[in-house]
Image (spheres, rainbow, N blue to C red):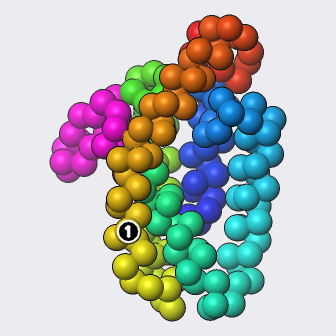
């Protein structure tokens, strides 16, 4: 579920017209291929993995959780009735898509957290804590990628970056 949530998060951004992580470097085809292959491999391996791969999946799940945390910490939010951060806008998606994007992020982050707590038992328990150190790095990376994608959208408008023009 965590792998599916991360893939849904990334491909929602792409389908919505803001690109996806690494699209500014690899182009939309390269980034899409990389994300699809990575997600497909992880999804396939998650169902057949031996416990010796717990550390690898703990790292993947920790990264996914850190990415969601970076979104919620690095972009404008408001608080829900339950006190949770709710994105008002993120990476050029616009307020109208936040009603879809926020649940995707919460699903992805919750699935990653649940996997860390229940599935990756033989992995070192400190790995998720180390991933919290990634949050500031991922915030900077998200903003840098967004800035580069906006520049590309102005120079070369395409369907995959239409919201950034």
Question: Is 131 left or right of 115, judged from the image as shown?
Answer: left
- In-front residue for pair 87/42: 42
Residue at (48, 39) in percent of width and height: 141
Residue 67 in the image, given as x and y percentages of width and height = 46, 51
Which residue: 65% across, 16% down? 152
Left or right, 113 with reference to 46: left
Q: Check the image and report above or below for 119 versus 141.
A: below
Location of residue 54 in the rendering, given as x and y in whole percent from the top left corner: 58, 83
Quarter of the picture holding the C terminus: top right
Q: Where is residue 45 in the image (x, y as percent from the top left)?
A: 74, 75
64 lies above or below 22: below
Q: In this view, does 86 lie above or below 153?
A: below
Secondary structure of the residue carrying tag 1 is: helix
Q: Does the magenta stretch include residue 76?
A: yes
The answer to whether 1 appears left or right of 73 in the picture is: right
Q: Quadrant of the N terminus?
A: bottom right
Q: Is residue 9 visible?
A: yes
Which residue is identified by label 1? 130
Q: Is residue 25 above or below residue 94?
A: below
Kindly identify the residue that appears in the image at 41 percent across and 38 percent down: 140
Q: Quadrant of residue 94?
A: top left
Q: Is residue 24 magenta?
A: no
- Residue beneath the point at 75% across and 41% down: 32
- Total number of numbered discs in the rendering: 1
Q: Residues within 10 Å of mark 1 (few under 14, many from 20)?
A: some
Q: Where is residue 138 in the image (x, y as percent from the top left)?
A: 44, 46
Residue 12 visible, this orientation: no
Q: Report the front residue among 118 and 42.
A: 42
Specify the segment rendered in magenta.
68-88
């Amino acid at each position: 579920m965590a792998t599916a949530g991360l893939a849904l998060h990334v491909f929602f951004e792409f389908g919505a017209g803001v690109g996806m992580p690494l699209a500014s470097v690899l182009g939309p085809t390269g980034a899409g291929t990389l994300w699809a292959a990575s997600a497909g491999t992880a999804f396939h391996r998650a169902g057949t993995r031996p416990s010796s791969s717990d550390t690898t999946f703990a790292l993947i799940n920790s990264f996914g959780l850190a990415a969601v945390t970076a979104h919620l910490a690095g972009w404008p939010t408001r608080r829900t009735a339950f006190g949770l951060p709710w994105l008002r806008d993120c990476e050029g998606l616009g307020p109208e898509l936040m009603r879809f994007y926020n649940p995707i992020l919460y699903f992805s982050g919750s699935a990653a957290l649940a996997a860390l707590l229940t599935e990756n038992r033989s992995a070192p328990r400190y790995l998720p804590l180390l991933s919290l150190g990634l949050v500031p790095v991922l915030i900077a990376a998200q903003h840098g990628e967004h800035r580069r994608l906006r520049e590309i959208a102005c120079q070369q408008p395409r369907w995959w970056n239409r919201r950034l023009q």
